[in-house]
């Protein structure tokens, strides 16, 4: 019944938007009604990826409850990314990104970010049909409970958990700060010096874009040979620290960065801002670990049990979980990594 | 319901739990309004202590609009602690809109038996417990460290529009009627913020929410 209900909702959304045009005209641009109309695939009736859409895989992927994810970027013909400011890449108008989410071997949703005009990025999520042949534009408010991500736990008596297709407001919550950001497509995440300990990192294939291929194919400018000679890498005192800082940067840094509307909280986890350690280690923070009121620190060296960041990553209760959206299942691998990192920090 | 609270807000417990049915948390607001009305009746229909402070001189049109909204939308119901007066519960105007008093350390919330009762509230109406855990009403005064003093109007707007702390953080918890507040237009939210910034700053660090049991 849930599937039927969700299908009805997306069908209505598709009908309402049936007249939507992918080409930006004088009216505000809107996303097409069907994923097959977005340019992801090579032609009508196929789910073969258009070869102009280039796959990539960030070295520090966002945790999405164990979803298998695929990502592609399409730059307008002859256009390139302006990387004059290495920390703030400017994508040409017309750029499109897609990210496909699968659970248990089935495609569940594909998200698209499209720079329709200089000022406007269009956010869209497409929900896959039962036959896995097409995905339809989800309503702006998203679609709850579309796929199981954790089964009912009989031993613990805990109910199962399901994936929700986020609404546009939730998408903007992470992607929009001072400006719209493409998370996961930046110098650090596309570095050819990949972190072997990054949780949930996918295997890099030859087709995937990296800093090297972007540079060699003139897809970014100005040409920066140093990106190939000395690719970006997190400087750290240990392998655990390198991976932990990368994980925090991707999973927390989209909100906790210097450009964010919550920068005044003083917690900066985006690696490019270079303040993760100074704003966390031995810092009290606004939120304290309930079981360690006095000892609680954002990161308490040697003491993961009184480190608020770890405690909140461990929670999936709305009042305390971090990140506050996009996940309903604790990332055990990442938690183990962060615990190892804090323990070694004596 | 009987409530006895002394001046230090360390209440002596002769109260029965205040409860509200279902996850429709707007009901909690209605209950609050009902009780406030009841106390007004008990007081003979009025009493200076039962109404918010008078408009300070010199409010701008925007701030006056904000005050009107604060006074009519029920903000005081939860954000100004109730105290026991001679005629029943009434707002503690020395703590106007300063949220749950930090001096009132709540004991663990009572565990309710299975059934339709779903939540409990402190006698102050500033601490609420239900399936979401325990929530404490926020300090809305412009105190820099503990209130809205370091907030920007944009953060306030985002909080109201998204139902998330500063537009990005944890959900704003029940009984805050976020569904209603989302309907406010930006102009009115700006007016609310403008008025709140004119209040007397009260240093009062409201506790963080408490997760429900068995939820690490």
Image (cartoon, grey):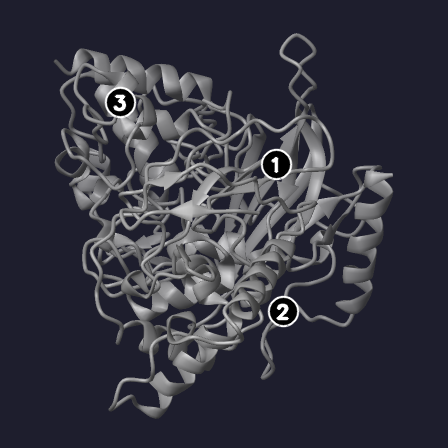
How much space separates mark 1 and mark 2, taking CA atoms? Answer: 22 Å
Q: Earlier in the sequence, mark 1 or mark 3?
A: 1
Relative image position of residue A309 (x, y in whole percent): 31, 30
Relative image position of residue B167 (x, y in whole percent): 42, 57
From the viewer's perspective, tell me whether residue B165 is left or right of residue A159: left
Label 3 chain ID: A
Instruction: Return the residue at label 2.
Output: A30
Mark 3 neighbour density, 10 Å: few (under 14) some (14–19) many (20 or more): few
Q: Which mark is residue A292?
A: 3
Q: Nearer the viewer, residue A291 or A248?
A: A291
Residue at the spot 82% in from the left edge and 40% down from the top edge: A3
Q: Earlier in the sequence, mark 1 or mark 2?
A: 2
Quarter holding residue A61: top left
Q: Nearer the viewer, residue B176 or A123?
A: B176
Same chain check for tags 1 and 2? yes
Mark 2 neighbour density, 10 Å: few (under 14) some (14–19) many (20 or more): many
Residue at the spot 24% in from the left edge and 91% down from the top edge: B58
From the viewer's perspective, tell me whether residue B32 is left or right of residue A42: left
Q: Earlier in the sequence, mark 3 or mark 2?
A: 2
Relative image position of residue A236 (x, y in whole percent): 16, 24
Is B151 located above or below residue B216 in the figure?
below
């Amino acid at each position: 019944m849930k599937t039927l209900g969700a299908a009805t909702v997306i069908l209505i959304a598709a009908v309402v938007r049936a007249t939507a045009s992918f080409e930006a005209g004088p009216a505000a641009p809107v996303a097409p009604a069907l994923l097959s109309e977005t340019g992801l695939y090579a032609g009508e009736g196929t789910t073969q990826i258009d070869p102009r859409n280039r796959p990539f895989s960030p070295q520090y992927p966002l945790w999405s409850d164990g979803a298998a994810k695929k990502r592609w970027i399409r730059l307008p013909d002859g256009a390139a990314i302006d990387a004059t400011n290495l920390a703030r890449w400017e994508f040409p108008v017309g750029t499109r990104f897609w990210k496909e989410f699968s659970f248990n071997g089935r495609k569940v949703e594909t998200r698209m970010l499209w720079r329709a005009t200089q000022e406007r990025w269009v956010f869209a999520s497409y929900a896959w049909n039962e036959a896995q042949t097409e995905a339809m534009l989800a309503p702006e408010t998203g679609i709850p409970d579309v796929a199981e991500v954790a089964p009912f736990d009989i031993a613990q008596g805990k109910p199962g958990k399901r994936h929700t297709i986020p609404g546009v407001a939730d998408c903007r919550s992470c992607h929009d700060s001072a400006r719209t950001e493409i998370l996961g497509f930046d110098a650090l995440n596309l570095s050819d010096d990949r972190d072997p300990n990054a949780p949930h990192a996918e295997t890099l294939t030859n087709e995937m874009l990296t800093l090297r291929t972007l540079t060699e194919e003139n897809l970014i400018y100005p040409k920066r040979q140093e990106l190939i000679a000395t690719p970006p890498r997190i400087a750290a005192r240990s392998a655990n620290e390198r991976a932990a800082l990368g994980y925090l940067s991707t999973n927390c840094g989209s909100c906790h960065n210097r450009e964010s509307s919550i920068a005044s909280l003083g917690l900066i986890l985006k690696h490019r801002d270079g303040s993760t350690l100074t704003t966390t280690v031995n810092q009290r923070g606004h939120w304290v670990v309930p079981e360690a009121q006095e000892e609680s620190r954002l990161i308490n060296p040697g003491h993961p049990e009184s480190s608020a960041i770890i405690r909140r990553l461990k929670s999936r209760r709305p009042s305390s979980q971090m990140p506050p959206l996009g996940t309903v299942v604790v990332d055990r691998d990442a938690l183990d990594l962060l615990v190892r990192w804090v323990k070694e920090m004596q | 319901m009987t409530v006895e609270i002394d001046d230090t807000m360390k209440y002596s417990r002769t109260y029965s739990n205040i409860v509200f049915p279902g996850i429709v948390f707007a009901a909690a607001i209605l209950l609050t309004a009902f009780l406030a009305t009841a106390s007004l009746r008990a007081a003979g229909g009025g009493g200076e202590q039962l109404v918010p402070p008078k408009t300070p001189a010199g409010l701008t049109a925007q701030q006056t609009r904000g005050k009107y909204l604060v006074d009519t939308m029920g903000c005081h119901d939860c954000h100004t602690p109730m105290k026991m007066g001679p005629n029943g519960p009434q707002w503690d105007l020395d703590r106007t809109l300063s949220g749950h008093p930090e001096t009132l350390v709540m004991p663990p919330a009572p565990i309710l038996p299975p059934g339709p009762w779903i939540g409990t509230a402190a006698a102050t109406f500033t601490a609420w417990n239900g399936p979401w855990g325990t929530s404490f009403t926020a300090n809305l005064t412009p105190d820099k460290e503990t209130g809205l003093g370091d907030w920007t109007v944009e953060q306030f707007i985002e909080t109201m529009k998204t139902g998330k702390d500063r537009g990005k953080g944890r959900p704003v918890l029940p009984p805050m009627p976020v569904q209603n507040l989302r309907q406010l237009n930006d102009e009115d939210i700006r007016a609310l913020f403008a008025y709140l910034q004119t209040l007397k700053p009260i240093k009062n660090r409201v506790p963080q929410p408490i997760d429900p049991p068995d939820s690490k």
